[in-house]
Amino acid sequence: MELRYKWLLDFCSYYNGEENTETNHTSGMLWEYERVWVMRISNWHFSSGELNEYIHYGLGDFNADDGVPITLKIILFNRYMHWNFCGTAEGFKEWYLATYKNRLKEKKLSKGKRILNKYRLAFLEYRSDWKSIERTPEMDYMFEIANAVDVEHGYDQPIAEGIMCRALAHADTHGYTIEIVPDARCIFNRQLDGWKYHPEYKEIRERALAFIKREMPEYDNAEYIGRWKGKYVYSPFNEEGERLMECYPYILLDKETVELFIDRSLWGENEHVNPKR
């Protein structure tokens, strides 16, 4: 079976995408556990319940910075408890350090590649429905990097991996932030998650928000919903979730004009209100 994310093998010490050729029982067992991890994380088949169980045993911070993903540790822990009917968390730690961690092969990855793999993996873990992980702005940043390098939306890689790795290493060294700006053709149909970072989108959205602040103070935000007759269409909303009008207001923008469009289709009529330049 062709691997969906070959870079996951960078986290493995026994499984390299090939058939099992290990003759040692322990090595063959660890080969299988790593293979299962690659298949499961590739298909987003982890749940918050598995994470919660691992944390319940006090293992949430166990060797957190040793380079072995927590999802892989969860599989190792699950199998350890399966084969050791009276197993304990302390017993797992001893087994892990003596049997698995002790046999890890040295991975000679560049700093940028290690950072990139961390972001990519966080992307897959979150898509695995780990609801107990709070989504943060840093995670959104990870997702943009993952999408820019991996083909998640059916397009060729818009950023070469080598370039991205060098940029990440440089940014990490100097404390910089990287924004992923996708190809303009992908922006407004949302076929790349990074569309919201494109300069043209930012400018249009800022104009829509300025219009709301000036003309519709009862609203405090707007969502881009598509294109209509050559204009960008935004739907204003209130962060409190209140229904403020018995109709559907939309803001229509192009590069020169901004106008409010009231959809009264439920009552059989539409109207344009307050065209603004």
Image (cartoon, rainbow, N blue to C red):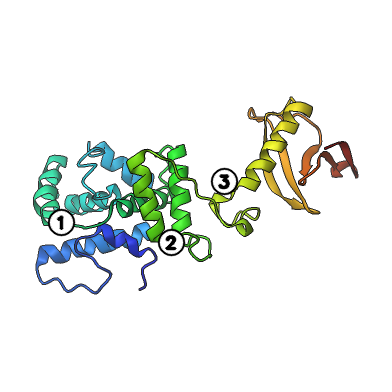
Looking at the picture, how far across and down is residue 183, in whole percent? 58, 57
Q: Residues within 10 Å of mark 2 (few under 14, many from 20)?
A: few
Q: Is residue 47 left or right of residue 33?
A: right
Residues under labels 2 and 1: Cα distance?
29 Å
Amino acid residing under circle 3: Tyr
Which mark is drawn over residue 104?
A: 1
Q: Is residue 264 left or right of residue 181?
A: right
| Residue situated in front as seen by the camera: 139 or 168 | 168
**Image point (34%, 53%), residue name:** 117
Front: mark 3 or 2: 2
Amino acid residing under circle 1: Leu
> Reading the chain from its start, which is encountered first: label 3 or label 2?
2
Which mark is drawn over residue 197?
A: 3
- Quadrant of image for the N terminus: bottom left
**Quarter of the image holding residue 210?**
top right
Which mark is drawn over residue 160?
A: 2
Query: Mark 2 falls on what kind of element?
Result: loop
Q: Is residue 251 left or right of residue 224?
A: right
Q: Are marks 3 and 2 in contact (CB under 8 Å)?
A: no
Amino acid residing under circle 2: Ala
Front: mark 2 or 1: 2
Looking at the picture, how far across and down is residue 2, in whole percent? 37, 72
**Image point (17%, 63%), residue name:** 29
Looking at the picture, how far across and down is residue 228, in whole percent? 78, 52
Front: mark 1 or 3: 3
Query: Mark 3 falls on what kind of element?
Result: helix
**Image point (13%, 40%), residue name:** 90
Query: Mark 1 falls on what kind of element?
Result: loop
**Image point (89%, 41%), residue name:** 271
> Reading the chain from its start, which is encountered first: label 2 or label 1?
1
Q: Is residue 84 left or right of residue 10?
A: left
Looking at the picture, how far across and down is residue 208, in whole percent? 72, 37
